[in-house]
Image: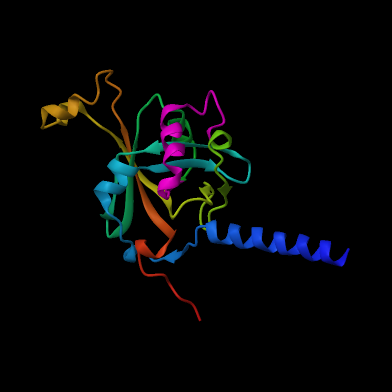
Amino acid sequence: MASQIGIYYTAKQRKLRQNEELAVKREEIAPSQLRLPVYRSWCDEGFLLTCGDHSTGRFNTMTAGWGSVGCMWKRPMAMVVVRPQRYTRKFMEEYPDFTICHFPPEHSEALVYCGSHSGRDVNKIVECGLTPIASKTIGSPAFDEADLIMECGKMYFDDLEPQHFLAEFIEENYPNKDYHRLYFGEIKAAFGTKEYGSWQTTG
């Protein structure tokens, strides 16, 4: 019996160690210290843009392949764009904040799924096996599987005006005239793995 108990706890400890090894180890990064390959991370890999209220479970997420991170009004700022027909647009209008999450390559299929299915029709988060977690500074949730989380408070929005396009290729992205709305969000906090910046230390 003692040997069976020992085997049980050894297996349990092994599983816990495996889970710890698989867990993404994020630490807080000062927004001013963020480092990321901006073109590749948006256009080639993508983020999940999530908006709503984690405490009530009312939120939605979508894949975002267009956007930017930089400085505006002397503040660290992220800019995301959402078409009018997207279900996430409703949440972006209703709630004051959002998160942007980047993921390791093994979750690329989840981003493809979230970009091709609507939260109106399916529970994308359940289907993808992602784990929503509470943010540290805002109400919108993030995801435990992310290797970078940016928590953003909305600061400004505006709609793209086609009469302001100065290059023909821009209009080619809108055959249905569904022009994006832009949202600027101040990066209130960021948490990521070491490749995204210098981890803050306390003490």
Residue 76 relative to residue 98: left or right: left
Instruction: Classify 87 as above or below 149.
Output: above
Position of 85 with respect to 74 (left or right) is: right
Q: Is residue 89 left or right of residue 133?
A: left
Q: Which residues are magenta?
A: 98-124
Residue placed farthest to the top in the image? 176
- Residue 55 to residue 60: above or below: below
Task: Give the residue furthest to the bottom.
Answer: 203
Residue 156, image x, y percentages: 34, 44
Quadrant showing the N terminus = bottom right
Q: Position of residue 61 (x, y in %)?
A: 48, 37
What residue is at 44 percent from the left and 55 percent from the top?
147
Q: Does residue 203 appear to the left or right of 150 in the view shown?
A: right
- Please check the rendered image and state whether residue 181 is part of the magenta-colored stretch, yes or no: no
**Residue at x 25%, y 32% (from the top left corner):** 160
- Classify residue 199 by image quadrant: bottom left
Question: What residue lies at 10% left-to-right and 32% top-to-bottom?
Answer: 166
The picture places residue 46, in percent across and down from the top left corner, at 35, 42
Q: Nearer the viewer, residue 172 or 17?
A: 17
- Report the residue at 56% width, 33% height from top: 127
Locate residue 79, reporting x and y percent: 32, 45
The image quarter containing residue 75 is: bottom left
Instruction: Examine the structure image and report whether residue 99 is included in the region drawn in magenta.
Output: yes
Q: Is residue 119 above or below residue 65?
A: above
**Foreground pick, 2 / 104:** 2
